[in-house]
Image (spheres, rainbow, N blue to C red):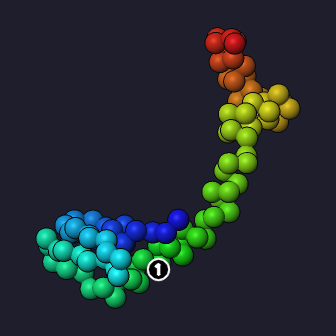
């Protein structure tokens, strides 16, 4: 996914008001508030893209991991919770059976 120019602008100034016209030879920004320098926007765009790209592993893992509830239930059934936590979970499971 490519980070949008609008996201970079909002990251620099959340109150900025602007419109972007997407043309085949590039974007044209019309400013309704004080303009932000193109160099600053491009730098922020690169920073946000690098940050997004660096988290690819987390997004990929998320789809492969079991749901957190399933993970916790497996730990409960394996008996690895402290006694007070296991008692609280058992109480809840007994109160709301399947």
- Please, is residue 42 above or below residue 76 in the view? below
* Label 1 Cα neighbours within 10 Å, binned few <14 / some 14-19 / many ≥20: some
The quarter of the picture where residue 52 lies is bottom right
Query: What x and y, as percent, mark residue 77?
Result: 82, 28
Residue positioned 22% across, 67% down in the render: 19
Q: 80 or 34, which lies in front?
A: 34
**Residue at the extreme bottom:** 39
Query: What x and y, as percent, mark residue 10?
Result: 31, 67
Residue positioned 68% across, 11% down in the render: 97
Query: What x and y, as percent, mark residue 51?
Result: 53, 71
Query: What x and y, as percent, mark residue 56?
Result: 63, 64
Apparent side of residue 41 relative to residue 18 in the rendered image (left or right): right
- Please, is residue 3 above or below residue 58 in the view? below
The quarter of the picture where residue 9 lies is bottom left
Q: How many marks?
A: 1
The quarter of the picture where residue 55 lies is bottom right
Residue that mark 1 sits on: 46
Residue 82 appears in view: no
Residue 90 appears in view: yes
Which of the image's four quarters has the C terminus? top right
Apparent side of residue 85 relative to residue 52 in the rendered image (left or right): right
Q: 72 or 70, which lies in front?
A: 70
**Residue at the extreme right:** 78
Residue positioned 30% across, 85% down in the render: 38
Where disc 1 sits, the SS reads: helix
Residue positioned 13% across, 71% down in the render: 32
């Amino acid at each position: 996914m490519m980070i949008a120019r609008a996201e970079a602008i909002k990251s620099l100034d959340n109150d900025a008001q602007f419109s972007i016209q997407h043309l085949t030879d590039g974007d044209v920004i019309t400013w309704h508030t004080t303009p932000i320098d193109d160099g600053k926007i491009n730098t922020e765009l690169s920073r946000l893209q690098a940050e997004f790209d660096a988290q690819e592993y987390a997004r990929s893992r998320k789809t492969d991991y079991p749901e957190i509830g399933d993970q916790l239930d497996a730990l409960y059934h394996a008996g690895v919770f402290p006694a007070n936590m296991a008692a609280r979970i058992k109480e809840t499971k007994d109160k709301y059976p399947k």
